[in-house]
Image (cartoon, coloured by chain):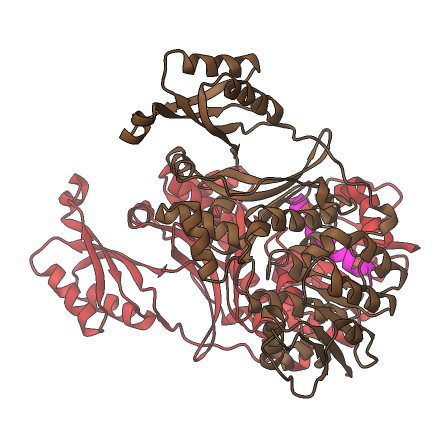
Chain colours: A brown, B red
Amino acid sequence: MTEPLRLGVAGLGNVGTGLARLLLRQGNALSVRAGRGMRLAAYSARKSRDGMAEVAGARFHDDAAALASAGDIDVFVELIGGAGGVAFEAVKAALRRGLPVVTANKAMLAEHGLELAALSEAHDAPLFYEAAVGGGIPVIKTLRESLAGNAIERVSGILNGTCNYILSKMEQERLPFDACLAEAQRRGYAEADPTFDVGGFDTAHKLAILASLAFGSKIDSSAVAVEGIESIAPADIAAADELGFRIKLLGVAERTPHGVEQRVAPTMVEKGAPLAQTMGVLNAVSIVGDAIGELTLVGPGAGGDATASAVAADLVDVARGARLPTFGRPVATLTEADRVPLQRHEGGYYVRLTVVDRPGAMAAIATRFGDRMISLEAIMQKRATREWAEAGVVPVVLMTHGTSESSIRDALARTVEEGVVRERPQVIRIEREAV
Amino acid sequence: MTEPLRLGVAGLGNVGTGLARLLLRQGNALSVRAGRGMRLAAYSARKSRDGMAEVAGARFHDDAAALASAGDIDVFVELIGGAGGVAFEAVKAALRRGLPVVTANKAMLAEHGLELAALSEAHDAPLFYEAAVGGGIPVIKTLRESLAGNAIERVSGILNGTCNYILSKMEQERLPFDACLAEAQRRGYAEADPTFDVGGFDTAHKLAILASLAFGSKIDSSAVAVEGIESIAPADIAAADELGFRIKLLGVAERTPHGVEQRVAPTMVEKGAPLAQTMGVLNAVSIVGDAIGELTLVGPGAGGDATASAVAADLVDVARGARLPTFGRPVATLTEADRVPLQRHEGGYYVRLTVVDRPGAMAAIATRFGDRMISLEAIMQKRATREWAEAGVVPVVLMTHGTSESSIRDALARTVEEGVVRERPQVIRIEREAV
């Protein structure tokens, strides 16, 4: 057996300490599987924040860049996070030295993935990042290796545990968004500033990574159309339930006749579909390929131990000397990411309106939809509650047949202009088949 | 770019022609991903049966052993099937030459896996077999690579599409087993002699492979306790439905205090659990590890194209020069497979009895269960139909709390001896949590 692989781990937060625990617990088994020992040789951490003061037998660096340049490591493990700054500089330094890099940093990959892939290629230093998307779910390996024989048609998933926890809780306990967000913050599932998660941006970063792997395009998170979950109201959750759907924040990248469309948005998913069954902090990814048909992976999308499991898998690949192009193929063959406007959506849309209770209001709305050639599958108007009645409005839910995003937005803009609705109309895409 | 990888493909059945199609369709993309071209250089097929008479530019061999010894191939792809015979001899010949082997043959691995692993190791000729379990689902790679950092606690799954199709159809159309089997045969999902599938033996082969990978044991399909689905009656399907369960043929390998237990049996799975959602010819595998928690993979378990997708992934690994121990670690470190009697089952059992309609019959049954310290969670006795009444019997369903297989079998044997039940009692394990 060759010399043990010497790990240099930058960052001892949740994932870093999870990795240290995993090495203590599974070190021997890992060595047997990797054909080579593994040893935490050096690490860096912010003393002020990171808990683990000392790792026995490992050298401490107070700065990640110094660690990445250290002579006594064989692989640089970046668990600091953040798109740029310290993490990015240290990873570049490691790659330039020809050192393999393992990272869990999706923001860095989403923003600088192409540059890193080129560096990796130029210096023959592989870059592994299983932990960056879907926590413990092996979605990177699945797309980069297992589905190499497929033309991928679609990748979709629930990629943010915070949002899924909030939406699940809203449904299960019929609580409003704010209360569920506060509970997620209490449990440590959401940051003090939750914008990045609930605004859909974290999902967009992860989707951009998957889309690059799936479609061979240059990673570009600015090509993703993003909508968050902040506007989802209990009324939407209740209507979805009644209609046989569940609302999930989905990231979807799919091949259309006009190019690959990438979008993140709250979506109505049929209750029977695998993605609808994914509750709480679980993540799920569904991939459609020409040979395989549909493959779905469900597992823990976050958590120190589950994410460390993904980091450990990458380390075994490094120990075995695996060499893979960062995005599954040489950088020179990656195409520009498409920027296609959102296409006609065959599943149709759910629209919830607060309609002014006066004669002709519904007729005006129906006319606007008709003008845009949008045909309605269902119209639901419930008896108004006392509150609604006092406010002189009635809540109306419409379900449309397949139509385009622009037609819907346009019809609603006209409806709003005419003053027949109050509040911002709610619009949610519907996925009809198993997604 | 180096010379193309020359494939020697033995067998042009369903999977072989699927692979040929995939290479035609995706050959260029595969080359870009693998960093090396791929070419079907030679093949063997039974002229009498296999459809494709000629593959352009490839040399034809009328015997697989000759193909495995041919000088003009870089990898031997075995798609013949069958535990021994031609396939086994050809694979051994290829490994002895140091040629990498890709196979879809679960029966051969289940029966001769250890010998093949030793040959692979001795001749530094890697053996890949993603297509052997779960069709297109990348479960081999997931266990062998992605979960390398985990102590696996449990692997369970729906691994046979034929059985799952039959059970799904029995539920959806309320038809008896025989009618659904006949329909499966008409659709080509079941063989003329269906014993191997419906008797649970195919699932046992696949489970043995997964158990070896998961627990580092010498593959031994004779260590699997096997029950098939032939005895499942419409009454069981209906009772399961009423109780909130679905009956699935599960393969389960799990660590118990007495060793790893391996079993294949029809099982009641809660309708909300991911495995219960897996209908028709889909397969699903759920893996529990100490770091990752639970991971579930769902996808097509059979079909030429989906299985060819798995073969193609293995070929990319071969093209990249990947070297992995056959069962994830060196043969010398594999332990003997445990042979533990079925343990106490915390989920309890479903028992359906045809009770003789006479005073004291139920008391006799309850006494026998009480003798064995089996506590009952529920007893359901419906009004007898006219048929039942005329036969002088009543159908009774019991649900027990956690108990052991031997206690249940024992209590039922006594009950049968006393003549208070007619027909063989039906016994099905219940899985209470998400499996």
Q: Nearer the viewer, residue A367 or B348?
A: A367
Is residue B402 visible in the rendered structure shown here?
yes
Residue A258 left/right relative to A420? right
Residue A291 position, x and y percent, is 68, 43
Residue B102 position, x and y percent, is 74, 59
Magenta part of the chain: B300-322
Q: Quadrant of residue A404?
A: top right
Q: Quadrant of residue B432?
A: bottom left
Q: Quadrant of residue A308?
A: bottom right
Residue A26 position, x and y percent, is 60, 78
Q: Nearer the viewer, residue A204 or A194?
A: A194
> Who's the residue at 62% across and 24% down the image?
A406
> Who's the residue at 53% across and 58% down the image?
A192
Magenta: main secondary structure = helix
Screen quadrant of the N terminus of chain B:
bottom right
> Who's the residue at 51% across and 48% down the image?
B162
Q: Is residue A154 magenta?
A: no
Q: Nearer the viewer, residue A78 or B225?
A: A78
Residue B72 left/right relative to B121? right
Screen quadrant of the C terminus of chain B:
bottom left
Residue A2 position, x and y percent, is 79, 82
> Who's the residue at 84% across and 62% down the image?
B69
